[in-house]
Image: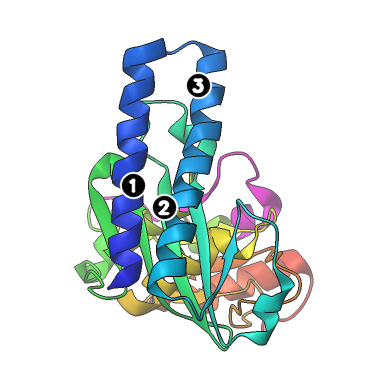
Amino acid sequence: MLAAELATQTGALLLTLQEQYRLDVGSARDHLDDLRDAGDRLAHEFLAGALAEARPGDAVLSEEAPDDRRRLGHRRVWIIDPLDGTRQYGEPPRTDWGVHVALAVDGAPVAGAVALPGEGVTLSTADPPSLPAGGGQAGRPRRVITSRSRPGSDARFVAAALGAELITLGSVGAKVAAVIRGEADAYVHSGGQSEWDSAAPVAVALACGLHASRLDGRPLRYNRPDVELPDLLICRPALAEAALAAAAASLGAPAS
């Protein structure tokens, strides 16, 4: 599958770049900022070039390029976050960063891959991992995962309603991977995101059988004129009703 191949290849390039910086300049703060900038640039240029060659008739929406509004006239749009978790990428040995490659067709995220290069893992709709029995909850309390930098009140509402502890992690891909693997039960975000942040993780989550929606229950749609996608819920299906009700209470409106 193209998305998985490209995400994995991009991740390998980013790991190589990270090692080159470690050997050449060490870990000084200004050099780590240079590493982040170089990683964003390298990943975008590789993915944009590879997609132009492999799918020349498709449009591309990337975090690292100006928004070409001609994409709105295309049914097939690749939505990419070449380096999700840029800050964490510049803080080795942290591994909660990744590469997102997704294909939206008529607004639906139909294919995608999330590479977590620091873990040597790529999660893909081509071969979606099975969810652990019982959600992987045996022997641990319920967990709701949210943004480290923008936790938001909605996540606290959902965690309280589910009787869960609230935990934080870096990139969106790493958060969704934690739910897929049963390390957390839900991911709640309401601090503002863009389409490239969630398109690939949502595609993989849906392929695995997880619930994925806006906090008001509406489906997540992509390739819209406004690329901002301010909130989302990804969770085990058995928790979706309670989580959406809690989110609705936080938002002050009934769940749809």
Which residue does the image show at 41% across and 12% down from the upper left?
A: 25
Q: Amino acid at mark 1?
A: Gly
Residue denoted by label 1: 11
Separation (CA) of disc 3 from disc 2:
19 Å
Separation (CA) of disc 1 from disc 3:
18 Å
- Residue 2 in percent (x, y) is at 32, 70
Q: Do the numbered discs 1 and 2 sit on residues whose CB atoms are within 8 Å?
A: yes
In the displayed structure, 209 sits above or below 133; it is below
Which residue does the image show at 62% across and 68% down from the upper left?
A: 246
Does the magenta run of residues contain 21? no
Q: Which residues are magenta?
A: 140-158
User: Which quadrant holds the C terminus?
Assistant: bottom right
Which residue does the image show at 60% across and 51% down from the upper left?
A: 64
Which numbered dot is residue 201?
none
Does the magenta run of residues contain 142? yes
One can see residue 235 in this view: no
Residue denoted by label 3: 32
In the displayed structure, 26 sits above or below 215; it is above
User: Which quadrant holds the N terminus?
Assistant: bottom left
Q: Amino acid at mark 2?
A: Val
Secondary structure of residue under mark 2? strand
Q: Earlier in the sequence, mark 1 or mark 3?
A: 1
Separation (CA) of disc 1 from disc 2:
6 Å
Residue denoted by label 2: 99
Q: Are there few (<14), some (14-19), or many (20+) residues within 10 Å of tag 1?
A: many
For residue 127, side relative to residue 40 (left or right): left
Indicate the quadrant where residue 206 lies.
Answer: bottom left
